[in-house]
Image (cartoon, rainbow, N blue to C red):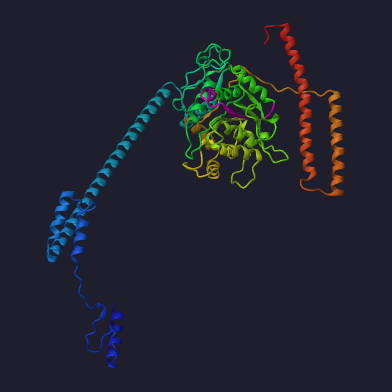
């Protein structure tokens, strides 16, 4: 700094000799006062600025005067002259500084008190741990003394090793014996009798409590109580006789929660859907029939039942008959003509169709799905948006290959399943499948569950699937538990109590060996001929060899199954013969 000042003085002296301006911009002899440092008079604040400042200081967030006192002070300030206002503003500034200082002191005191409490708690914990360690040390020393008196000498390392081995063995035994399933009984639905066979639920699902019940079914009291009935019920004269326990308690629980869920609306103004994930033996067909009949009892006379095969049409009629309503019309869509259906011939009832029918159309581009929508809308004055009947997707996993903005192309079946739900937004949709979704991407067609879309945390299915996939398999289990807690999902299965299995080896006789060898020669000759054809003519589109190997695998799978079936039949006949000889053998 001294050297810099000396240089500045030398430059000023040189500039003074040559008559040049000084380093501060003044002329020689002007004293070298810098122009930018010359003091300028401060502008005086206006009355409006002073009033605004006073209003801000006295208002909320600063001094926070009561409304009456605030208004009185402001009125007095408006009557003051400019010098008075200026003095009052200085006084307010001092008060504000004092107020903020007191606030800071209060905050500091609170922090100090919290810190003292934390220190005291930490000291108490340390003292407790120290006392506990001393107690354990005393107990260990006493035990050691007893062992020495008894002549038993054991090192600490050996003791710890044995304890660790015992603890590990106990943990492994606990994990091995931990139950995977738990016996199931309806928790909040009190209708019906127990299921004919024991049913179970996974422990994770059993830990979730379903929602409270407010829905009351419209079925006859005989079905709800599990007793034999029908034929003489004055409230339901159309009901025919049925056996006792036609609907078990578990099946009635699915009916109640489905009806309760169907009475709710999703955030996107579509009607809520329900998902039945019961396994084989619980009676999913009987559950579907009961839900449809419940809607019939409440004035919704048309429903759509979509299933896997036309052969299941007769099973659907049997389920209605077993519940006392053999008179319900069940129309097989695959046997009906294309085009508009005559209302006189195809009125109220159940339209039964397959997933293949949903994508079917004739040479005139008339589609089956349009027939379904038109037939359903006829019960709502021709308006599809007002149809409130049931759409039951039995074996719904058939529609799982639906690509929604996920970089792939979905199947036509998945697109049609999603399409009919969009065309009938108020329909009561039911998804039924024991294997509905092994992966989250398989849930794309279940739009009525309300898990994504408007009013949910996920704007679309792609966002929902990405979040669940990122979280892993555990997220799928949590999703199922959340769906049960919200009353949109049930999943039970048979307990298979007392069942056992064993692996049997099916020995091939000479006839089966010859049959297998001949099949291998046939397919080998076909492969040779196919390769020559491809070499001579080339291939167009799908490669023939890929189609060949697909058919090859399917053929030998069927061949081996047929050979094993013959062995199974022989063992079954032998077991029946033994049971006839010794009836006590089961």
- Whether residue 300 appears in magenta in the rendering, the answer is yes
Placement of the N terminus among the 4 image quadrants = bottom left
542 up-or-down from 30: above or below: above
Q: Nearer the viewer, residue 264 or 366?
A: 366
Quadrant of residue 410 within the rendered picture: top right
Which region of the structure is painted magenta?
Answer: 294-310
Farthest residue, direction bottom: 18
Q: Nearer the viewer, residue 460 or 263?
A: 263
Quadrant of residue 89 within the rendered picture: bottom left
- Whether residue 520 appears in magenta in the rendering, the answer is no
Q: Does residue 553 appear to the left or right of 502 in the view shown?
A: right
Q: In this view of the protein, can residue 428 be seen by the observer?
A: no
Placement of the C terminus among the 4 image quadrants = top right
Task: Determine the residue positioned at 79% across, 32% down.
Answer: 556
Q: Nearer the viewer, residue 462 or 224?
A: 224
18 up-or-down from 141: above or below: below
Q: Does residue 515 appear to the left or right of 210 in the view shown?
A: right
Task: Determine the residue positioned at 30% across, 93% down.
Answer: 18
Q: Residue 140 in the image: x percent, y percent?
A: 39, 28
Q: Nearer the viewer, residue 289 or 70?
A: 289
Q: Residue 391 in the image: x percent, y percent?
A: 58, 31
387 up-or-down from 91: above or below: above
């Amino acid at each position: 700094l001294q050297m810099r000042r000396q240089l500045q003085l030398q430059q000023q002296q040189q500039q003074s000799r040559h008559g040049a301006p000084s380093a501060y911009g003044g002329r020689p002899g002007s004293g070298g006062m810098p122009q930018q440092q010359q003091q300028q008079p401060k502008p005086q604040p206006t009355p409006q600025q002073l009033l605004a400042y006073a209003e801000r200081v006295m208002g909320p967030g600063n001094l926070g005067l009561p409304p009456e006192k605030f208004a009185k002070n402001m009125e007095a300030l408006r009557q003051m002259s400019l010098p008075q206002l200026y003095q009052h503003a200085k006084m307010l500034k001092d008060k504000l500084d004092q107020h903020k200082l007191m606030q800071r002191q209060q905050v500091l005191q609170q922090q100090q008190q919290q810190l003292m409490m934390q220190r005291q708690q930490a000291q108490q914990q340390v003292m407790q741990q120290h006392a506990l360690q001393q107690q354990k040390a005393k107990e260990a020393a006493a035990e050691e003394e007893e062992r020495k008196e008894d002549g038993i000498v054991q090192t600490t390392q050996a003791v710890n090793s044995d304890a660790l081995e015992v603890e590990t063995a106990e943990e492994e035994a606990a994990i091995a014996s931990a139950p995977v399933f738990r016996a199931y009984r309806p928790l909040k639905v009190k209708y019906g009798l127990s299921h004919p066979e024991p049913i179970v639920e996974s422990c994770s699902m059993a830990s979730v409590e379903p929602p409270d019940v407010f829905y009351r079914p419209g079925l006859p009291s005989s079905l709800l109580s599990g007793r034999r009935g029908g034929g003489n019920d004055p409230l339901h004269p159309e009901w025919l006789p049925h056996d006792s326990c036609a609907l078990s308690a578990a099946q009635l629980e699915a009916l109640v929660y489905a009806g309760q869920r169907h009475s709710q609306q999703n955030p996107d103004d579509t009607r809520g859907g329900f998902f039945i994930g019961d396994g084989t033996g619980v009676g999913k067909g009987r559950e579907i029939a009961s839900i449809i009949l419940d809607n019939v009892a409440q004035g919704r006379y048309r429903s759509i039942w979509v299933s896997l095969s036309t052969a299941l049409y007769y099973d659907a009629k049997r389920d209605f008959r077993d519940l006392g309503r053999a008179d319900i019309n069940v129309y097989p869509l695959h046997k009906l003509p294309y085009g508009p259906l005559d209302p006189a011939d195809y009125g109220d009832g159940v339209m039964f169709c397959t997933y293949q029918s949903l994508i079917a159309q004739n040479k005139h581009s008339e589609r089956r799905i349009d027939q379904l929508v038109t037939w359903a809308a006829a019960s709502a004055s021709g308006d599809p948006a007002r149809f409130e009947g049931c759409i039951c997707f039995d074996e719904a996993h058939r529609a799982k290959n639906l690509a929604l903005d996920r970089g792939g192309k979905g199947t036509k079946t998945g697109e049609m399943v999603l399409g009919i739900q969009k065309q009938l937004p108020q329909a009561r949709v039911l998804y039924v499948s024991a294997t509905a979704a092994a992966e989250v991407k398989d849930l794309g067609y279940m739009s009525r569950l309300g898990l994504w879309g408007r009013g949910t945390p996920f704007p679309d299915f792609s966002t929902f699937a990405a979040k669940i996939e990122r979280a892993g398999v555990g997220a799928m289990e949590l999703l199922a538990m959340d769906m049960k807690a919200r009353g949109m999902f049930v999943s039970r299965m048979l307990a298979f109590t007392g069942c056992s299995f064993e692996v049997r080896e099916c020995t091939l006789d000479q006839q089966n060996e010859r049959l297998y060898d001949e099949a291998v020669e046939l397919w080998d000759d076909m492969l040779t001929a196919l390769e020559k054809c491809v070499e001579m003519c080339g291939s167009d589109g799908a490669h023939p060899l890929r189609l060949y190997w697909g058919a090859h695998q399917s053929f030998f799978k069927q061949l081996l199954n047929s050979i094993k079936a013959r062995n199974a039949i022989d063992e079954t006949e032998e077991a029946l013969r033994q049971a006839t000889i010794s009836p006590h053998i089961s």
